[in-house]
Amino acid sequence: MSALPARRRAGEAAAILLMLALCWPALAQTQQGTGRTAPRSPAAPAAPAAPVEPAPTAYEPDMLRLAEVIGSLAFLRQLCGGAEAPAWRQRMTELLDAEGTTPGRRERLAGAYNRGFRGFALTYRTCTAAAGEATARLSADGERLSRILAGRFGG
Protein backbone atom coordinates (compact mmCIF):
# COMPACT_ATOMS: atom_id res chain seq x y z
CA MET A 1 0.00 0.00 0.00
CA SER A 2 2.90 2.32 0.41
CA ALA A 3 3.37 2.35 -3.36
CA LEU A 4 -0.04 3.99 -3.90
CA PRO A 5 0.70 7.13 -1.87
CA ALA A 6 4.06 7.49 -3.66
CA ARG A 7 2.32 7.30 -7.04
CA ARG A 8 -0.28 9.81 -5.89
CA ARG A 9 2.44 12.21 -4.78
CA ALA A 10 4.23 11.80 -8.11
CA GLY A 11 1.00 12.49 -9.96
CA GLU A 12 0.32 15.58 -7.85
CA ALA A 13 3.84 16.84 -8.46
CA ALA A 14 3.41 16.31 -12.20
CA ALA A 15 0.12 18.22 -12.10
CA ILE A 16 1.74 21.08 -10.25
CA LEU A 17 4.59 21.20 -12.77
CA LEU A 18 2.07 21.19 -15.63
CA MET A 19 0.13 24.05 -14.03
CA LEU A 20 3.32 26.04 -13.56
CA ALA A 21 4.30 25.46 -17.19
CA LEU A 22 0.88 26.61 -18.39
CA CYS A 23 0.79 29.62 -16.08
CA TRP A 24 4.40 30.73 -16.63
CA PRO A 25 3.61 33.55 -19.11
CA ALA A 26 1.22 35.14 -16.62
CA LEU A 27 3.70 34.69 -13.78
CA ALA A 28 6.45 36.28 -15.86
CA GLN A 29 4.35 39.43 -16.18
CA THR A 30 3.96 39.75 -12.43
CA GLN A 31 5.62 42.91 -11.23
CA GLN A 32 8.56 42.01 -9.06
CA GLY A 33 7.88 42.47 -5.38
CA THR A 34 4.26 43.60 -5.70
CA GLY A 35 2.46 40.39 -6.58
CA ARG A 36 0.33 42.28 -9.10
CA THR A 37 0.26 41.48 -12.76
CA ALA A 38 0.93 44.03 -15.45
CA PRO A 39 -2.14 45.22 -17.37
CA ARG A 40 -2.88 43.18 -20.46
CA SER A 41 -5.53 45.40 -21.99
CA PRO A 42 -4.52 47.00 -25.28
CA ALA A 43 -6.62 50.00 -24.27
CA ALA A 44 -4.44 50.66 -21.22
CA PRO A 45 -2.94 54.16 -21.37
CA ALA A 46 0.65 54.27 -22.55
CA ALA A 47 3.31 56.29 -20.83
CA PRO A 48 3.21 59.93 -21.95
CA ALA A 49 5.42 60.56 -24.96
CA ALA A 50 8.31 62.98 -24.64
CA PRO A 51 7.56 66.33 -26.24
CA VAL A 52 8.65 66.46 -29.85
CA GLU A 53 11.51 68.85 -30.44
CA PRO A 54 10.73 71.09 -33.42
CA ALA A 55 13.19 71.30 -36.28
CA PRO A 56 15.99 73.81 -35.72
CA THR A 57 15.30 77.30 -36.98
CA ALA A 58 17.17 78.69 -39.97
CA TYR A 59 19.04 81.06 -37.70
CA GLU A 60 20.01 78.53 -35.03
CA PRO A 61 23.71 78.25 -36.03
CA ASP A 62 24.09 82.04 -35.80
CA MET A 63 22.19 82.10 -32.51
CA LEU A 64 24.41 79.37 -31.05
CA ARG A 65 27.52 81.23 -32.16
CA LEU A 66 26.17 84.42 -30.58
CA ALA A 67 25.59 82.56 -27.31
CA GLU A 68 29.18 81.28 -27.46
CA VAL A 69 30.48 84.81 -28.06
CA ILE A 70 28.46 86.10 -25.10
CA GLY A 71 29.96 83.37 -22.89
CA SER A 72 33.46 84.24 -24.07
CA LEU A 73 32.93 87.94 -23.42
CA ALA A 74 31.40 87.20 -20.01
CA PHE A 75 34.63 85.50 -18.98
CA LEU A 76 37.05 87.94 -20.58
CA ARG A 77 35.33 91.10 -19.32
CA GLN A 78 35.20 89.62 -15.81
CA LEU A 79 38.89 88.66 -16.05
CA CYS A 80 39.90 92.10 -17.24
CA GLY A 81 37.73 93.92 -14.70
CA GLY A 82 35.31 95.46 -17.16
CA ALA A 83 32.55 97.44 -15.49
CA GLU A 84 29.97 95.81 -17.79
CA ALA A 85 31.08 92.25 -16.94
CA PRO A 86 27.84 91.30 -15.11
CA ALA A 87 25.80 92.58 -18.06
CA TRP A 88 26.99 89.70 -20.29
CA ARG A 89 25.47 87.10 -18.01
CA GLN A 90 22.24 89.11 -17.96
CA ARG A 91 22.24 89.29 -21.78
CA MET A 92 22.50 85.51 -21.92
CA THR A 93 19.59 85.15 -19.50
CA GLU A 94 17.54 87.42 -21.74
CA LEU A 95 18.55 85.40 -24.81
CA LEU A 96 17.52 82.15 -23.07
CA ASP A 97 14.18 83.68 -22.07
CA ALA A 98 13.52 84.84 -25.63
CA GLU A 99 14.91 81.91 -27.63
CA GLY A 100 14.91 78.94 -25.22
CA THR A 101 11.42 77.89 -26.26
CA THR A 102 11.99 74.16 -25.67
CA PRO A 103 14.19 72.33 -23.17
CA GLY A 104 16.45 71.06 -25.96
CA ARG A 105 16.92 74.49 -27.49
CA ARG A 106 17.54 76.03 -24.09
CA GLU A 107 20.14 73.36 -23.39
CA ARG A 108 21.92 73.98 -26.71
CA LEU A 109 22.05 77.73 -26.11
CA ALA A 110 23.31 77.34 -22.55
CA GLY A 111 25.87 74.77 -23.77
CA ALA A 112 27.18 77.22 -26.36
CA TYR A 113 27.50 79.95 -23.69
CA ASN A 114 29.34 77.56 -21.38
CA ARG A 115 31.62 76.40 -24.20
CA GLY A 116 32.66 80.00 -24.89
CA PHE A 117 33.14 80.78 -21.20
CA ARG A 118 35.16 77.62 -20.47
CA GLY A 119 37.21 77.85 -23.64
CA PHE A 120 38.71 81.15 -22.55
CA ALA A 121 38.89 80.11 -18.90
CA LEU A 122 41.25 77.33 -19.95
CA THR A 123 43.45 79.74 -21.91
CA TYR A 124 43.62 82.90 -19.78
CA ARG A 125 44.43 83.23 -16.09
CA THR A 126 45.23 86.95 -16.14
CA CYS A 127 44.19 89.83 -18.31
CA THR A 128 46.83 90.12 -21.03
CA ALA A 129 47.13 92.05 -24.27
CA ALA A 130 46.02 88.88 -26.09
CA ALA A 131 42.91 88.74 -23.90
CA GLY A 132 42.19 92.36 -24.82
CA GLU A 133 42.62 91.53 -28.52
CA ALA A 134 40.32 88.51 -28.16
CA THR A 135 37.73 90.73 -26.48
CA ALA A 136 37.86 93.21 -29.36
CA ARG A 137 37.50 90.45 -31.98
CA LEU A 138 34.66 88.78 -30.10
CA SER A 139 32.85 92.09 -29.70
CA ALA A 140 33.09 92.68 -33.45
CA ASP A 141 31.90 89.12 -34.15
CA GLY A 142 28.98 89.52 -31.74
CA GLU A 143 28.00 92.82 -33.33
CA ARG A 144 28.17 91.27 -36.82
CA LEU A 145 26.01 88.30 -35.72
CA SER A 146 23.49 90.62 -34.09
CA ARG A 147 23.17 92.65 -37.31
CA ILE A 148 22.77 89.47 -39.39
CA LEU A 149 20.13 88.04 -37.08
CA ALA A 150 18.19 91.29 -36.85
CA GLY A 151 18.46 91.97 -40.60
CA ARG A 152 17.47 88.52 -41.84
CA PHE A 153 15.15 87.28 -39.16
CA GLY A 154 14.14 90.30 -37.07
CA GLY A 155 10.56 91.43 -37.00
Image: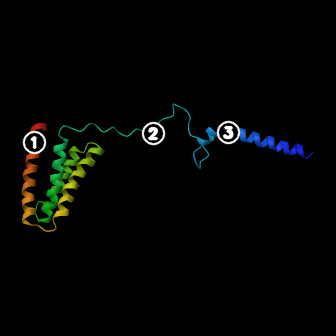
Image coords of residue 55 (percent x, y): 26, 36
| Label 3 packing within 10 angstroms: few (<14), some (14-19), many (20+) | few
- In this orientation, does residue 12 appear? yes
* In-image side of 1 versus 115 (left or right): right
Image coords of residue 22 (percent x, y): 67, 36
Q: Secondary structure at mark 1?
A: helix
Image coords of residue 39 (percent x, y): 56, 37
> Is 66 drawn above or below residue 152 in the view shown?
below
As measured in the structure, the alpha-carbon distance from the residue carrying label 2 to the one carrying label 3 is 31 Å
Q: Nearer the viewer, mark 2 or mark 3?
A: 3
| Residue corresponding to mark 1 | 148
> Is 7 drawn above or below residue 116 in the view shown?
above
Q: Amino acid at mark 1?
A: Ile
Give the mark, 3 or 1, whose residue is nearer the N terminus: 3
| Residue corresponding to mark 3 | 21
Identify the disc placed on residue 13. Answer: none
Q: Nearer the viewer, mark 3 or mark 1?
A: 3
> Is 136 drawn above or below residue 22 in the view shown?
below
Foreground pick, 150 / 10 = 10
**Where the N terminus falls, by quadrant?**
top right
**Where the C terminus falls, by quadrant?**
top left
| Label 1 packing within 10 angstroms: few (<14), some (14-19), many (20+) | some
Q: Secondary structure at mark 2?
A: loop
Give the mark, 2 or 1, whose residue is nearer the N terminus: 2
- In this orientation, does residue 155 appear? no
| Residue corresponding to mark 2 | 47
Q: Amino acid at mark 3?
A: Ala
Residue farthest along the bottom direction in this orientation: 126
